[in-house]
Image (spheres, rainbow, N blue to C red):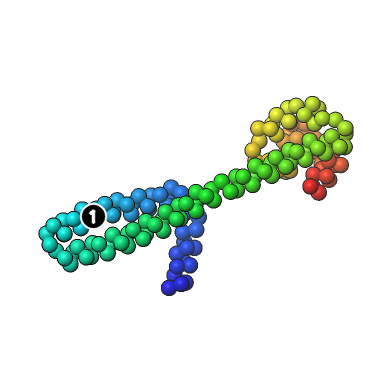
Amino acid sequence: MKYIKLYEEFLNEGRTIEKIEKDRTQVINDMAKIVTQWTAAKQSGNKEAEAALLQSLKDLTAEKKELGIELNHAIAGKDRDIELVISEAEEVKKGIHDHWQEVYGKDFIAEHPAIAKILKNRKNLDLREFERIWDESYEEDFKETHPNIWDKMNKS
């Protein structure tokens, strides 16, 4: 049974928040239907049906709880990668400014305001993306024209 659980977890890995919420909503709707049937069975005195429906409600309650936990984990992990990308982008931006100042003794933003504006608005930025932006903007290879900065950035 342990291996079946692990296999089920493997199948559920990567499910979207929307899919989990859809499954949870379906379970809640099923529970509402069963409550109506359980109430009718209780009023009619059908103890067998009442017990079976009550067990179904207990099973669905457990399933709802598991889906709630899965949903919470999916929501909690959603922004984890975004925060990492943003912090890396800020590190690249700061590195460019600092290294430019160190190598040339000049302010990067003052010398290249157009590139600085692009970098400021770019959320997902790594060194390759910076190089691409530079190369397309100035039609020159950043690595060749600014090797000292490129080397410093790659060491950072």
75 relative position to 45: left or right: right
- At 62% from the left and 45% from the top, the residue drawn is 83
Quadrant of the rendered structure where residue 99 is? top right
The crowd level at tag 1 (other Cα within 10 Å; few <14, some 14-19, many 20+) is: some
Query: In this orientation, which residue lies closer to the viewer: 12 or 40?
Result: 40
129 relative position to 46: left or right: right
Where the N terminus falls, by quadrant? bottom left
Query: In this orientation, which residue lies closer to the viewer: 113 or 65?
Result: 65
- At 70% from the left and 29% from the top, the residue drawn is 117
- At 47% from the left and 63% from the top, the residue drawn is 9
The spot of residue 81 in percent (x, y) is 60, 48
Q: Residue furthest left?
A: 44
User: On screen, 6 above or below 127?
Assistant: below
Residue 145 appearing in the image: no
Residue 137 appearing in the image: yes
Query: Which residue is disc 1 drawn over?
Result: 35
Quadrant of the rendered structure where residue 46 is? bottom left
User: What SS does tag 1 mark?
Assistant: helix
Question: Could you tell me how many numbered marks the image carries?
Answer: 1
The spot of residue 129 in percent (x, y) is 70, 41
The spot of residue 76 in percent (x, y) is 52, 50
The spot of residue 40 in percent (x, y) is 16, 56
Amino acid type of the residue that numbered disc 1 sits on in the rendered structure:
Val
